[in-house]
Image: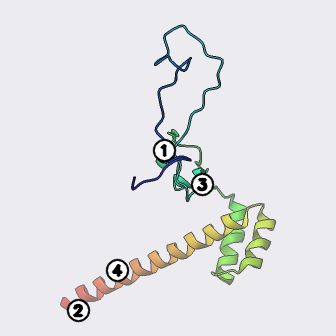
Amino acid sequence: PAQKWGRNPGRRTRPLSLNPGESRLTPGTRTTAPVRIEIPTSPRMPLHKQSGGFPSRSPIGFSGGERTIKRSTFSPEQLSVLEEAFITNPLPNLAARHLLAEELGLTPRTIQVWFQNRRQKVKKLSSAAGAASTSNDTLSSAG
């Protein structure tokens, strides 16, 4: 009662039967009546959104791998253009990303992700360099 599923939440379903008086199917018998299978769905959310967009969480039982995205690889020419653009402007706007995408034959989203990853790399390298110089200063002042 607290959880309302399906079209008729209060309705109980009976086992599938061939005739109104028959209680169960027997092996080898056939039915000409259409079989209707109801999958419980939330009344507030469409079925495709119930799984959270991840096939592994789906109530229907997807095996996974349907949304696997191939890792992008860049040619040396593409990388040199991207690196040059990064030196000029590490935060390109939408128009600049679209121009780069058209020039390199990539999607604007791929360009955006490349720039995000490159900025993180710079941040990581600068923090590692700062930590190394701090430890060297400590060692040299102690000696």
Q: How many marks?
A: 4
Query: What kind of element bears circle 1?
Result: loop
- The residue carrying mark 4 is 132
Residue extending farthest to the bottom is 141
Q: Residues within 10 Å of mark 4 (few under 14, many from 20)?
A: few
| Residue that appears at 53% across and 46% down | 8
Question: Which residue has dot 2 on it?
Answer: 141
Q: Is residue 79 left or right of residue 24?
A: right
Image height check: is 74 above or below 103? above
Please, what is the three-letter code of the amino acid marked with disc 1?
Answer: Pro
* Cα distance between the residues tagged 3 and 4: 53 Å
Q: Quadrant of residue 138?
A: bottom left
Residue 59's disc is 1
Which x, y percent locates residue 114?
Answer: 62, 68
Q: Please rate how many residues cluster around mark 3, counting C-alpha atoms within 10 Å: few if below 14, some from 14 to 19, many from 20.
A: few
Find the distance from the CA under tag 4 to the CA under tag 2. 14 Å
Give the residue at x 55% y 59%.
44
Mark 1 to mark 4 CA distance (whole Å): 50 Å
